[in-house]
Image (cartoon, rainbow, N blue to C red):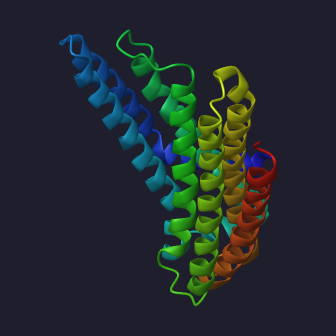
Amino acid sequence: MRGLLTIARYELTRRWALWLVMAGVGFLARILASFTYDDRLFNVCVVGAVVLSWVVAFIVGMSLFGRALHDGRLGFFFTRPIHGVVIAAGKLVGGLVLILGMEVLLLIPLFSSDFTTTGDDGPRFVIGIALAFLAAGLVVGILARSRSRWFIADAIGGAIAVLLAIIVFGESNAAQRYAIVQKWTPEEAGPMLGRIDTLMRGLAIAAIVVVLAAVTAAITLGRTDRERVHRSLAMTLWSSLAVTGLVGVAFAYWGLL
Protein backbone atom coordinates (compact mmCIF):
# COMPACT_ATOMS: atom_id res chain seq x y z
CA MET A 1 0.00 0.00 0.00
CA ARG A 2 2.86 2.39 0.78
CA GLY A 3 4.37 1.83 -2.67
CA LEU A 4 1.02 2.46 -4.35
CA LEU A 5 0.50 5.74 -2.47
CA THR A 6 4.08 6.83 -3.18
CA ILE A 7 3.66 6.30 -6.92
CA ALA A 8 0.25 7.99 -6.93
CA ARG A 9 1.69 10.97 -5.05
CA TYR A 10 4.54 11.13 -7.56
CA GLU A 11 2.11 11.34 -10.48
CA LEU A 12 0.09 14.04 -8.72
CA THR A 13 3.18 16.05 -7.82
CA ARG A 14 4.30 16.12 -11.45
CA ARG A 15 0.97 17.51 -12.66
CA TRP A 16 -0.50 19.45 -9.75
CA ALA A 17 -0.41 22.68 -11.79
CA LEU A 18 -3.31 21.33 -13.87
CA TRP A 19 -5.57 21.83 -10.86
CA LEU A 20 -4.68 25.51 -10.77
CA VAL A 21 -5.12 25.85 -14.52
CA MET A 22 -8.58 24.26 -14.55
CA ALA A 23 -9.71 26.27 -11.54
CA GLY A 24 -8.53 29.41 -13.31
CA VAL A 25 -10.38 28.46 -16.50
CA GLY A 26 -13.59 27.93 -14.53
CA PHE A 27 -13.37 31.24 -12.72
CA LEU A 28 -12.44 33.03 -15.95
CA ALA A 29 -15.64 31.78 -17.57
CA ARG A 30 -17.60 32.92 -14.53
CA ILE A 31 -16.01 36.37 -14.67
CA LEU A 32 -16.75 36.71 -18.39
CA ALA A 33 -20.36 35.83 -17.72
CA SER A 34 -20.65 38.56 -15.09
CA PHE A 35 -20.03 41.22 -17.74
CA THR A 36 -22.90 40.18 -19.98
CA TYR A 37 -26.56 39.28 -19.77
CA ASP A 38 -26.27 37.02 -22.79
CA ASP A 39 -26.45 33.37 -21.73
CA ARG A 40 -24.97 32.29 -25.06
CA LEU A 41 -21.57 33.77 -24.25
CA PHE A 42 -21.43 31.92 -20.97
CA ASN A 43 -22.54 28.68 -22.63
CA VAL A 44 -19.73 29.05 -25.15
CA CYS A 45 -17.28 29.54 -22.29
CA VAL A 46 -18.66 26.50 -20.46
CA VAL A 47 -18.41 24.26 -23.53
CA GLY A 48 -14.90 25.50 -24.31
CA ALA A 49 -13.70 24.94 -20.75
CA VAL A 50 -15.22 21.46 -20.56
CA VAL A 51 -13.80 20.38 -23.93
CA LEU A 52 -10.39 21.69 -22.86
CA SER A 53 -10.57 19.58 -19.71
CA TRP A 54 -11.41 16.49 -21.80
CA VAL A 55 -8.41 17.12 -24.05
CA VAL A 56 -6.19 17.46 -20.99
CA ALA A 57 -7.60 14.20 -19.58
CA PHE A 58 -6.73 12.43 -22.84
CA ILE A 59 -3.19 13.83 -22.83
CA VAL A 60 -2.71 12.80 -19.19
CA GLY A 61 -3.85 9.28 -20.08
CA MET A 62 -1.34 9.11 -22.93
CA SER A 63 1.53 10.22 -20.69
CA LEU A 64 0.83 7.99 -17.68
CA PHE A 65 2.21 4.81 -19.26
CA GLY A 66 2.82 5.47 -22.94
CA ARG A 67 5.50 8.12 -22.69
CA ALA A 68 7.30 6.42 -19.80
CA LEU A 69 7.18 3.07 -21.60
CA HIS A 70 8.47 4.32 -24.94
CA ASP A 71 11.13 6.59 -23.38
CA GLY A 72 12.43 3.80 -21.16
CA ARG A 73 11.56 5.59 -17.92
CA LEU A 74 9.08 2.95 -16.79
CA GLY A 75 12.01 0.67 -15.92
CA PHE A 76 12.83 2.99 -13.00
CA PHE A 77 9.78 1.70 -11.12
CA PHE A 78 10.53 -1.96 -11.87
CA THR A 79 14.04 -1.67 -10.43
CA ARG A 80 12.38 -1.15 -7.03
CA PRO A 81 11.04 -4.04 -4.94
CA ILE A 82 7.47 -3.23 -5.99
CA HIS A 83 5.07 -5.60 -7.76
CA GLY A 84 3.93 -4.66 -11.24
CA VAL A 85 0.30 -4.53 -10.13
CA VAL A 86 1.21 -1.95 -7.48
CA ILE A 87 3.12 0.13 -10.03
CA ALA A 88 0.25 0.13 -12.51
CA ALA A 89 -2.38 0.72 -9.82
CA GLY A 90 -0.39 3.56 -8.27
CA LYS A 91 -0.07 5.40 -11.58
CA LEU A 92 -3.75 4.83 -12.33
CA VAL A 93 -4.84 6.08 -8.91
CA GLY A 94 -2.69 9.16 -9.37
CA GLY A 95 -4.23 9.81 -12.80
CA LEU A 96 -7.78 9.26 -11.57
CA VAL A 97 -7.38 11.55 -8.57
CA LEU A 98 -5.78 14.17 -10.78
CA ILE A 99 -8.63 14.14 -13.31
CA LEU A 100 -11.39 14.02 -10.69
CA GLY A 101 -9.86 16.92 -8.78
CA MET A 102 -9.30 18.86 -11.98
CA GLU A 103 -12.92 18.44 -13.07
CA VAL A 104 -14.30 19.35 -9.65
CA LEU A 105 -12.22 22.54 -9.52
CA LEU A 106 -13.39 23.43 -13.03
CA LEU A 107 -17.07 22.72 -12.39
CA ILE A 108 -17.44 24.44 -9.02
CA PRO A 109 -17.46 27.98 -10.47
CA LEU A 110 -19.29 26.92 -13.64
CA PHE A 111 -22.19 24.94 -12.23
CA SER A 112 -22.62 27.09 -9.14
CA SER A 113 -23.40 30.02 -11.42
CA ASP A 114 -26.93 31.37 -11.81
CA PHE A 115 -26.29 31.43 -15.56
CA THR A 116 -26.29 27.64 -15.86
CA THR A 117 -29.55 25.78 -16.18
CA THR A 118 -28.17 22.23 -16.35
CA GLY A 119 -29.53 19.69 -13.92
CA ASP A 120 -27.73 17.40 -11.55
CA ASP A 121 -26.67 15.18 -14.46
CA GLY A 122 -24.48 17.94 -15.92
CA PRO A 123 -21.44 17.54 -13.62
CA ARG A 124 -21.74 13.75 -13.64
CA PHE A 125 -21.80 13.74 -17.43
CA VAL A 126 -18.73 15.99 -17.67
CA ILE A 127 -16.76 13.89 -15.17
CA GLY A 128 -17.83 10.63 -16.82
CA ILE A 129 -16.68 11.79 -20.26
CA ALA A 130 -13.40 13.01 -18.75
CA LEU A 131 -12.77 9.55 -17.30
CA ALA A 132 -13.60 8.02 -20.69
CA PHE A 133 -11.03 10.30 -22.35
CA LEU A 134 -8.49 9.34 -19.69
CA ALA A 135 -9.11 5.64 -20.38
CA ALA A 136 -8.84 6.18 -24.14
CA GLY A 137 -5.59 8.08 -23.64
CA LEU A 138 -4.13 5.18 -21.66
CA VAL A 139 -4.69 2.81 -24.58
CA VAL A 140 -3.58 5.23 -27.30
CA GLY A 141 -0.45 6.15 -25.34
CA ILE A 142 0.66 2.52 -25.19
CA LEU A 143 -0.20 1.73 -28.80
CA ALA A 144 1.05 4.97 -30.38
CA ARG A 145 4.72 4.10 -30.87
CA SER A 146 4.86 0.38 -30.18
CA ARG A 147 5.44 -0.58 -33.86
CA SER A 148 4.16 -4.09 -33.15
CA ARG A 149 2.43 -6.62 -35.37
CA TRP A 150 -0.32 -6.70 -32.77
CA PHE A 151 -1.82 -3.69 -34.51
CA ILE A 152 -3.72 -6.26 -36.59
CA ALA A 153 -5.42 -7.48 -33.42
CA ASP A 154 -6.15 -3.86 -32.49
CA ALA A 155 -7.81 -3.23 -35.85
CA ILE A 156 -9.96 -6.35 -35.62
CA GLY A 157 -10.83 -5.83 -31.94
CA GLY A 158 -11.62 -2.16 -32.47
CA ALA A 159 -13.86 -2.97 -35.43
CA ILE A 160 -15.76 -5.58 -33.41
CA ALA A 161 -16.18 -3.16 -30.49
CA VAL A 162 -17.51 -0.43 -32.81
CA LEU A 163 -19.88 -2.90 -34.50
CA LEU A 164 -21.31 -4.04 -31.16
CA ALA A 165 -21.70 -0.43 -30.04
CA ILE A 166 -23.59 0.39 -33.25
CA ILE A 167 -25.92 -2.58 -32.69
CA VAL A 168 -26.66 -1.49 -29.12
CA PHE A 169 -27.37 2.10 -30.15
CA GLY A 170 -29.48 0.88 -33.08
CA GLU A 171 -31.63 -1.36 -30.90
CA SER A 172 -32.03 1.41 -28.32
CA ASN A 173 -33.22 3.82 -31.02
CA ALA A 174 -35.53 1.14 -32.43
CA ALA A 175 -37.11 0.68 -29.00
CA GLN A 176 -37.71 4.41 -28.70
CA ARG A 177 -39.24 4.54 -32.19
CA TYR A 178 -41.48 1.63 -31.26
CA ALA A 179 -42.79 3.62 -28.29
CA ILE A 180 -43.49 6.57 -30.59
CA VAL A 181 -45.30 4.40 -33.18
CA GLN A 182 -47.38 2.79 -30.45
CA LYS A 183 -48.17 6.28 -29.10
CA TRP A 184 -47.16 5.38 -25.58
CA THR A 185 -47.69 8.00 -22.93
CA PRO A 186 -44.67 9.23 -20.94
CA GLU A 187 -45.81 7.03 -18.06
CA GLU A 188 -45.96 3.96 -20.30
CA ALA A 189 -42.59 4.66 -21.93
CA GLY A 190 -40.90 5.56 -18.63
CA PRO A 191 -39.77 2.02 -17.63
CA MET A 192 -38.33 1.34 -21.09
CA LEU A 193 -36.47 4.67 -21.17
CA GLY A 194 -35.12 3.89 -17.71
CA ARG A 195 -33.79 0.55 -18.94
CA ILE A 196 -32.15 2.25 -21.92
CA ASP A 197 -30.49 4.78 -19.62
CA THR A 198 -29.33 1.99 -17.31
CA LEU A 199 -27.92 0.05 -20.27
CA MET A 200 -25.95 3.01 -21.60
CA ARG A 201 -24.59 4.00 -18.20
CA GLY A 202 -23.71 0.41 -17.36
CA LEU A 203 -21.88 -0.15 -20.64
CA ALA A 204 -19.94 3.10 -20.27
CA ILE A 205 -18.85 2.25 -16.72
CA ALA A 206 -18.01 -1.33 -17.70
CA ALA A 207 -15.92 -0.14 -20.66
CA ILE A 208 -13.90 2.23 -18.46
CA VAL A 209 -13.32 -0.48 -15.86
CA VAL A 210 -12.29 -2.95 -18.59
CA VAL A 211 -9.75 -0.48 -20.00
CA LEU A 212 -8.24 0.23 -16.57
CA ALA A 213 -8.02 -3.50 -15.78
CA ALA A 214 -6.53 -4.30 -19.20
CA VAL A 215 -3.87 -1.60 -18.87
CA THR A 216 -2.99 -2.86 -15.39
CA ALA A 217 -2.65 -6.41 -16.70
CA ALA A 218 -0.59 -5.26 -19.69
CA ILE A 219 1.92 -3.35 -17.56
CA THR A 220 2.10 -6.15 -15.00
CA LEU A 221 2.75 -8.85 -17.61
CA GLY A 222 4.75 -6.87 -20.15
CA ARG A 223 6.74 -4.72 -17.72
CA THR A 224 9.15 -2.61 -19.83
CA ASP A 225 8.98 -4.63 -23.07
CA ARG A 226 6.87 -2.60 -25.50
CA GLU A 227 5.82 -5.55 -27.66
CA ARG A 228 4.87 -7.68 -24.64
CA VAL A 229 2.87 -4.80 -23.19
CA HIS A 230 1.10 -4.31 -26.52
CA ARG A 231 0.37 -8.03 -26.84
CA SER A 232 -0.99 -8.30 -23.30
CA LEU A 233 -3.11 -5.19 -23.80
CA ALA A 234 -4.55 -6.43 -27.10
CA MET A 235 -5.39 -9.87 -25.72
CA THR A 236 -7.07 -8.64 -22.55
CA LEU A 237 -8.68 -5.41 -23.77
CA TRP A 238 -10.44 -6.52 -26.95
CA SER A 239 -11.62 -9.86 -25.59
CA SER A 240 -13.06 -8.18 -22.50
CA LEU A 241 -14.69 -5.41 -24.53
CA ALA A 242 -16.18 -8.02 -26.86
CA VAL A 243 -17.75 -9.87 -23.94
CA THR A 244 -19.04 -6.60 -22.50
CA GLY A 245 -20.48 -5.62 -25.88
CA LEU A 246 -22.18 -9.00 -26.35
CA VAL A 247 -23.84 -8.64 -22.95
CA GLY A 248 -25.04 -5.19 -23.99
CA VAL A 249 -26.38 -6.52 -27.31
CA ALA A 250 -28.23 -9.34 -25.54
CA PHE A 251 -29.83 -6.86 -23.13
CA ALA A 252 -30.70 -4.51 -26.01
CA TYR A 253 -32.45 -7.30 -27.91
CA TRP A 254 -34.34 -8.95 -25.06
CA GLY A 255 -34.35 -6.56 -22.11
CA LEU A 256 -35.59 -3.21 -23.38
CA LEU A 257 -39.18 -3.92 -24.43
Location of the C terminus by quadrant is top right
| Residue 216 in view | yes
Q: Is residue 257 left or right of residue 125?
A: right
Q: Is residue 191 left or right of residue 51?
A: right
Q: Position of residue 159 (x, y in %)?
A: 58, 74
Residue at x 21% of width, y 15% of height: 38
Residue occupying the far left of the picture: 35
- Determine which quarter of the picture holds residue 64: bottom right
Q: Position of residue 184 (x, y in %)?
A: 66, 28
Residue at x 50% of width, y 86% of height: 147
Q: Is residue 197 above or below residue 147?
A: above
Q: Camera-side residue: 89 or 232? A: 232
Residue occupying the far front of the picture: 182
Residue occupying the far bottom of the picture: 149
Q: Camera-side residue: 123 or 203? A: 203
Q: Is residue 106 left or right of residue 149?
A: left
| Residue 90 in view | no
Q: Is residue 242 left or right of residue 12?
A: right
Residue at x 67% of width, y 37% of height: 197
Q: Position of residue 26 (x, y in %)?
A: 36, 26
- Determine which quarter of the picture holds residue 124: top right
Q: Position of residue 95 (x, y in %)?
A: 58, 47
Q: How many numbered marks appear?
A: 0
Residue at x 76% of width, y 63% of height: 246
Q: Is residue 30 above or below residue 106?
A: above
Q: Is residue 228 above or below residue 124?
A: below
